[in-house]
Each structure stands twice: as C-alpha cells, then as structure tokens.
Amino acid sequence: MMGRGIAEEGWRKGPWTSEEDKLLSEYVSVNGEGRWSSVSRFSGLSRSGKSCRLRWVNYLRPGLKRSQITPQEEGIIIELHALWGNKWSTIARYLPGRTDNEIKNYWRTHFKKKDKSSQKQDQRKAQILKPEMQQQYQQQLESGEMKMENTIDDHFKMNEAETFHNLEDQCWSAMSDQDVASWADFVVEDCYGLWGGLWNLDDHPQG
DNA sequence: AAACTAGACAACCGCTCTTGC
DNA sequence: CGCAAGAGCGGTTGTCTAGTT
C-alpha cells in the first residue's frame, strides 16, 4: 500500500518522530492543552491540530501507563463494556492512565473474536440496563458509593427479571387501553422489538 | 535466511457535539 | 436561532514486529 506522506493540506502524516514528540511536548508545557489548531503555527510542527491532539492524548500526556493491561483492568473493561457498549472514552475514565484508544484496541484484539454467545450476553446486559440505570451506575461510581468489581453483574442479575416483568406489564397494560390495530403496532414496535431482541440474543437462531 | 502471517498498537477519517459569536 | 470553528469520539486502516513455515 501507499505510505503516508504529506497530505493535500501540507500536513505530515504517519508515525510520529521523537523530534515531533519533543516539539509537541514543549508546546503543551508552555501553552497547555487545547487550541490544537494553533500548534502547527507556534511549534513548527507540520501536523494537523487533530493529529497533535491525538498524539498528546494517547501517547505523550503525563500519567499514561505504558504497561500491559492488568487482569483487574481487564475485568473492569469487560464489566463496563457490558454496561455501556463501545463508549470507550467513558470506560477510559474509570481506568486511570489508560486511553480510550488503548482500551478500544485491547478490546478488539482480545475480545472481538470471543464466542458469539458471550458477545450476545454482553449485548443483552447493555440492552436490559436502561439509560437511567446506567446513569445511576455512573453517579454511584463517581461518588464512590459503589465498587466496580462484581457489582455490575450482581445488579444485572437482580434487575434482569424485574426489567423483563416491567416490560411485560407495560405491554399488558397498554393492550387494555388500545384497540387491536394499535395494539398490533405496539407489539411490533415496543414489545416484540424489545423482547424479540432479547430472545434473539442467546440461544435462539436468528432469521 | 527469506517470505509469509497474525497480533498489537498507532494513527487517520468522518461524523457529532460543544462553544462562541 | 443559525452558523462556523474547534474539540472529541468511535470505527477503521496502516504499520510494525514477532512468530511460523
């Protein structure tokens, strides 16, 4: 394939050199983070602001861990991915020293090829946990009321049946208020859509 | 030793969100 | 409110390297 050289706009692309890293680090130490579009003007770098920001955030920023992901961190990644899906930057907030890019790459490398049933289980968790519940988790985690390990799975187990019954209740109560035609629409859009999604997630063959 | 392959990670792209005017 | 610019995010691709044939 063609190597990455100079872009149409004149920006350099491709891997960063140690000299470029040095220039970027010096710029940030003087000017602070932000104003990335000005970096090339003031630092002498032929890199786009976007590229500079990415390099700083993912590689040069102080406090980044360069070590391997630990089993504990892996556990947190798994739990939070089950909770939030591909919200890499959100997940990264709970892993100090790790970047969203790092976590994303780690996930793709280590879990992308895991068996489908496990993936479906994760999807199921993410689907069952309602947005308000996810928000509640985040608040509890931030305030330190809740510990990360083992809590999400436990909470999921407790809420799975409840959530399912709530959905069932919603459907039944809605049916009593609606005529058959609109009920059919409701079933298709709300009940069947959700339940069908859940039912399809595990052992049932997909059509 | 050379060629090939697969895994890991760095970096780019396109899009969305945020902010200032 | 609408627009433009900057910043951030997630998906994807490119590059490097270690292992295998």
Image: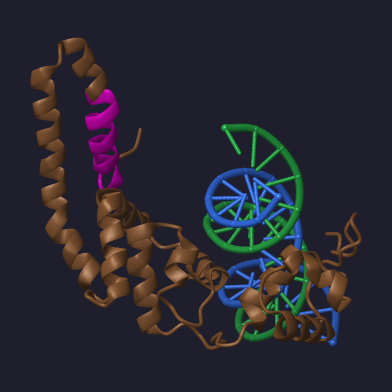
Chain colours: A brown, B blue, C green
Please identify the quarter of the rendering in which residue A8 is found: bottom right
> With A129 as the anchor, is B15 left or right in this view?
right
Q: Residue at x 22, y 75 (%)?
A: A145
Please identify the quarter of the rendering in which residue C6 is found: bottom right
- A49 to A181, vertically: above or below: below
The x and y percentages for residue A53 are 69, 70
- Of the 4 image quadrants, the one containing the C terminus of chain A is top left
- Of the 4 image quadrants, the one containing the N terminus of chain A is bottom right
The x and y percentages for residue A204 are 26, 41
The x and y percentages for residue A190 are 26, 30
- A130 to A67, vertically: above or below: above
> With C14 as the anchor, is A120 left or right in this view?
left
Please identify the quarter of the rendering in which residue A193 is found: top left
The x and y percentages for residue A48 are 80, 64
- A33 to A48, vertically: above or below: below
Magenta span: predominant SS is helix
Q: Which residues are magenta?
A: A187-204
Q: Residue at x 73, y 68 (%)?
A: A36
- B20 to A204, vertically: above or below: below
Examine the structure image and report whether residue A194 is included in the region drawn in magenta.
yes
The count of marks equals 0
Examine the structure image and report whether residue A172 is included in the region drawn in magenta.
no
Q: Residue at x 84, y 86 (%)?
A: A19
Q: Residue at x 32, y 73 (%)?
A: A142
